[in-house]
Amino acid sequence: MNDINKLYDLWLEKATEEEVHQELEAVKGDEKEILDRFWQNLAFGTGGLRGVLGAGTNRMNVYTVSQATQGLSNYLNEAFENPSVAVGYDSRINSDKFAKAAAAVLAANGIKVYIFKELMPTPIVAYAVKELGCSSGIVITASHNPSKYNGYKCYDERGYQMTDEAAARTLQYINSCDIFEDVKTIDFEKAVSEGAIEYIEESFLDKYFSL
């Protein structure tokens, strides 16, 4: 428990995002609640991440999403010459926030990002990966899980779920990345203004629905 308490103290110091910090303050001194949030890292597998929303390494928050995206960025920059990623999100709690956080990390790593302006079903994002010639896709969604959950799904360049091999390599990069020190990011709006992040035009939907 000592190591977990040290991890909690580190997050209390480093996690400045208001929602996360407030939750950490709220569970101060409660060993059971602290243990539940920090006893493990969210598992990244073929489908990406999925977990309960909240503060800590065992929760879906901007820090765990950003760390996963840094690992994905490292993998994509290794596997592709000029990688690009399509990003979409659903109506789950914090889905838009997580999508923008992921986009900002990708852009900071020199990866072109195409992101939808509004909520989008997963099949349309998968289609965008292939249609826009992207190297990967990210959808922030928890599918059928309860409302306290959210998730982070990764797709390959064909618009299919990421392979086991690619997920394993991405996980290696995630595990070697310090969640506070090693994650590159950029202001989302700045990246949009510079063209590193590009909104997908509404006309794209016309193309999809005409299939």
Image (cartoon, rainbow, N blue to C red):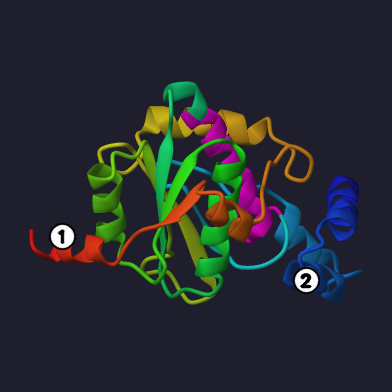
* Up-down relation of residue 23 to residue 138 (above or below): below
Question: Is 66 colored magenta in this rendering?
Answer: yes
Nearest the viewer among 166 and 188 is: 188
Q: Quadrant of residue 173?
A: top right
Q: Are marks 1 and 2 in contact (CB under 8 Å)?
A: no
Residue 58 in view (yes/no): no
Residue farthest front in this picture: 194
Q: Please, what secondary structure does the residue beneath circle 1 have?
A: helix
- The three-letter code of the residue at mark 1 reads Lys
Left or right: residue 144 compared with residue 181: left
* Up-down relation of residue 168 to residue 13 (above or below): above
Question: Is 99 colored magenta in this rendering?
Answer: no
- What's the residue at 51%, 59% (across, down)? 99
Label 1 and label 2: CA atoms lie apart by 40 Å
Q: Which residue is mark 1?
A: 207
- What's the residue at 68%, 41% (across, down)? 184
- The three-letter code of the residue at mark 2 reads Glu
Q: Position of residue 124 (x, y in %)?
A: 26, 59
Left or right: residue 135 compared with residue 70: left
Residue farthest left in this picture: 211
* Up-down relation of residue 112 to residue 138 (above or below): above
Q: Which residue is mark 2?
A: 18
Q: Position of residue 121 (x, y in %)?
A: 30, 66
Part of the protein shown in magenta: 57-76
Q: Please, what secondary structure does the residue beneath circle 2 have?
A: helix
